[in-house]
Amino acid sequence: MPLVRRDIARPTTASADEAAARDALRSADPDMRWNAARALGADPASVASLAAALSTEPVPRVREAIMTALMRIGNEESVKALLPYLREQDAARRGAAIEALQALPDVTAPFLSALLQDADSDVRILAVELVRTMPAAEATRLLCEVLAHEPHPNVCASAVDALAEVGTRDALPALEACARRFADTPFLPFAISIAVARISDGKG
Amino acid sequence: MTRSGEEDRAAYVSPEDVRRLCEFLYRRTGMLFAEDKRYYIDRRLHERIAATGAQSFQAYFALLRSGLDSEVEHLVNAFTINETYFFREDHQLRCMTSDLLDAVIRTKRPGDPIRIWSVPCSTGEEPYSIAIWLMENFPDVDNYQIEIVGSDIDTRALAAAADGVYGARALMKLSPALIARYFESASADGHRIDAGLRDSIQFTEVNLIDARAMAQHGRFDIIFCRNVLIYFDDASRRAAAENLFDCLHPGGFICLGHSETMSRISSLFRVCRYPDAIVYQRPETERDHD
């Protein structure tokens, strides 16, 4: 028989030493930082250490593990640690933060109103992406507010795109009003006409 | 069928109770059961309440949280799905012998170990399928020390895997010749994997999101992790993916279920498109910096 069988050690039962893992987040060895980040995903007291490590971590694999640990902890502090990355110039880091925040809709929700009114239109566009994954009724309400007040056509276009996917019929008046408000920006009324048709044809 | 008022009170489980139970299960295992699975949850929960003799959900939940009587293990066993069969999604087995092992043995010398992990392995159909497939289709099977490990969170399934007795449904994709070669009759409607094959596979308990328990298994050349990540939420899926990455040799491969894609879970792996299957590979080298 060419198959061999070797015994595998049973997992030890010693509790993880979170303090040591937090120290290891500052190690020069990326494997130690990687293991440390993965060991801290159940420790809410480690959010500050994880957030600090995330801001300086150069290795993508370790950065992903830190993001995962923050997602697993999933509290308000985790969200606060992730939000600054919406302003990150690097697209991969920005995208990773969006994915992590989308996985924490309930904890992220209280921050959305402020994000949707951020001075930076790019941040407002990303905030619309966070709204996209929320329950349809709440997403529709928030996106309609965007359509009513948002001055930047690209942010409105993102909201229209999200509504085409998740919006309910409650969005139709706001969409039509937005089309009138941006009548001089032809692509937007066109996008809105598609969203209106989709919502009207659907069960929303 | 009617039930007495006393029985109804004893068995009553509110939506809030279900939510608390699901939260508990999620924290312990990473498995996520949504409200739309309410019927599935209720049925198994009532079975466990009855089996433990608890008088109410509250009493049962207290027992569960106390960690007494291995009730967490019993509950996890009740909530896991163990239906599978031999040579399920055999295009991935074909891919293993057509392409993956060619890549693996380029890094090996004759006599070196090749380690293959089936996780979760449920009641053993997958690791035994891997073994049979290798014996039948891998010409170099005698030139390497091939180690197959089957792991699962469900200890009841692991006991069945080690026992290795299967009914006709599990064997439906095997030819009579293969059944004759690798099984012996155990009962009127059951066949047992032959002792040599049974003893060559190591079965272990493991939780995919437990980094330390996963790491205890060492590194593998190929991992089959099929049709389980769909039950996890985003955070647990990513944690599991990172643990699986850690358990692969650089250049090692992971096969997921047909409805699963690693690209939507983690950016750690490289997508490999082979004629028989799409699999994911731990890169040989990693980017140390952006």
Image (cartoon, rainbow, N blue to C red):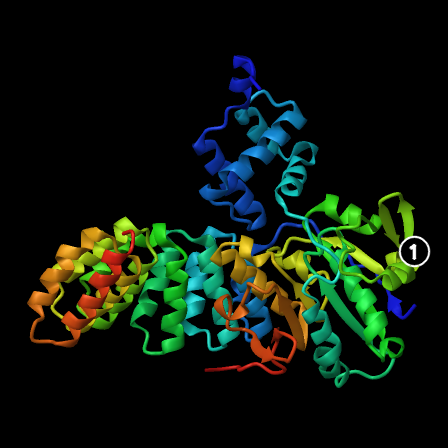
Q: How crowded is mark 1: few (under 14 residues within 10 Å), some or many (20 or more)?
A: few
Image point (30%, 61%), residue name: A165
The quadrant in which the C terminus of chain B is found is bottom left
Instruction: Please give the residue where the numbered disc 1 appears in the rendered image.
Output: B195
Residue A60 versus residue A156: which sits nearer the camera?
A: A156
Expressed as whole percent of the image width and height from the top left, the position of residue B220 reads: 72, 70
- Identify the residue at image location x=51%, y=18%: B9
User: Does B20 sit left or right of B278 as displayed?
Assistant: left
Q: Which residue is drawn at 87% across and 67% down?
A: A3
- The subunit carrying tag 1 is B
Image height check: is A9 above or below B132? above
In which quadrant of the rendered view does residue B91 lie? bottom right
- Whether residue B222 appears in this view of the structure is no
Q: Is residue B64 rendered to the left or right of residue B173?
A: left
Q: Quadrant of residue B130?
A: bottom right
* Quarter where residue B147 is shown: bottom right
Element type at marker 1?
Answer: helix
Front residue of this view, candidates B70 and A146: A146
Residue at (57% x, 65% y) in the render: B242
Is residue A98 visible to the viewer in this orientation of the structure? yes
Residue A163, percent from left and from top = 25, 60
Residue B282: where, in percent of width, then height? 61, 76
Q: For the residue marked with disc 1, what is the amino acid?
A: Ala
Q: Establish if A28 lies above or below B150.
A: below
Q: Looking at the image, which is closer to me, B66 or A204?
A: A204
Asked if residue B160 is positioned above or below residue A21 in the image, the reply reads above
Quarter placement of the N terminus of chain B: top right
Could you say where residue A37 lies in the image, as x and y percent from the top left? 53, 63
Please determine whether, in this image, residue B32 is positioned above or below residue A156.
above
